[in-house]
Amino acid sequence: MSRTLITGGAGFVGSNLARFIEPSVLLDWRKPGYLFEDGELIFDDAEFVKGDIRNGDDLEKCLEVGDVDSIVHLAAIPGVRKCEEEPELARSVNVGGTESVLEFARRNDVSKVVPASSAGVYGEIREQPITEEHPKDPLNLYSENKRKGEKLCREYSGSYGLDTTVLRMSNLYGPGFQVKPNLTVIPLFLLRALLNKPLTVYGDGEQTRDFVHVEDVAQGFQKVLESSDGSYRAFNLGSGETSSINELAETINELVDRLYDRNVDVEHVEMPEWRDEAKEEFDYSIDKIKREVGYEPVYSLKEGIREMIAGLF
């Protein structure tokens, strides 16, 4: 039976996606205990392969489980700071690893590849709302590597007819955030509020973001896998809901206060230099993916955070 290969299958998105996409084979260079129970993978109709996407032999091991007819490519060195700290590793995995996955797909007649990209490829925001046609001018190494990965996808699609659809994800959150190497703003605010510690907001807090629940992201990948275009496509993948950091802090405070009778302070501090790209407003258009593949996000920000709180206890 043909399977979907999920690279980075032990990560935040991959471990959520594996609950929805069957049958699958998860490839990751880690083999964490939270994916297994009594030695068995916790997902139905899934197999696990320990390996590195840069190693062609490790990718070929996935074929021992069964034919691979589609790939969701999530494996990456995540985060701006991690990539700046280890730039050679970041380039090797995020660019070289993507080329390795595309080459594996070409050699083995894989019908579809869906790589994860980032809204960070747009860089400084010049036009609102942000559509897929917005200029690409990444502000950091992580986003630049994602842009280079997209270029490789276009080249493989143009040269070899490989069906590739890139999904530019906005700010992710949801259950399973504990597996992420670095906490992002929602789990960080949530944990601090539950510990009765103040929430630190950079700048005036009026900068806006699109926060998308990981299960909506999984739905987006599913919809793309079910659709077929035969060429290169790129979609924004988000919630379509714009929230300021101040509104986020207020939402978390309101939910924690209602559930635990606890209200924490919000402290505004100067924006650090490495967060320069976080100063802007961010109105993320998801019209194209809704129109072309039928994607419809389900979670509001408040509903998603309420679910995260429930999942912690």
Image (spheres, rainbow, N blue to C red):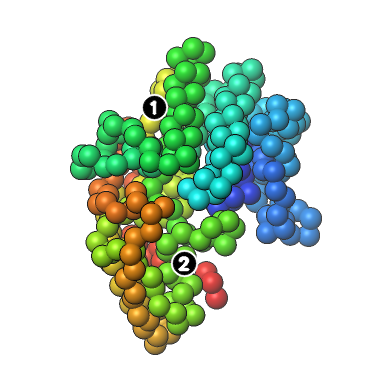
Q: Quadrant of residue 227?
A: top left
Q: Which residue is mark 1?
A: 233
Q: Residues within 10 Å of mark 2 (few under 14, many from 20)?
A: some
The amino acid on which the numbered mark 2 sits, given as a three-letter code, is Leu
Quadrant housing the C terminus: bottom right
Percent of width and height locating residue 138: 38, 37
Q: CA distance from mark 1 to mark 2?
A: 34 Å
Visible residue check, residue 257: no
Percent of width and height locating residue 106: 59, 18
The amino acid on which the numbered mark 1 sits, given as a three-letter code, is Arg
98 in relation to 185, above or below: above
Number of numbered discs overlaid on the protein picture: 2
The extreme top residue here reads 159
Q: Secondary structure at mark 1?
A: strand
Percent of width and height locating residue 152: 49, 23
Quadrant housing the N terminus: top right
Q: Is residue 66 left or right of residue 93?
A: right
Q: Which mark is residue 188?
A: 2
Q: Which mark is residue 159?
A: none
Please name whichever residue, 178 or 208, is drawn nearer the observer in this view of the structure. 208
Q: Earlier in the sequence, mark 1 or mark 2?
A: 2
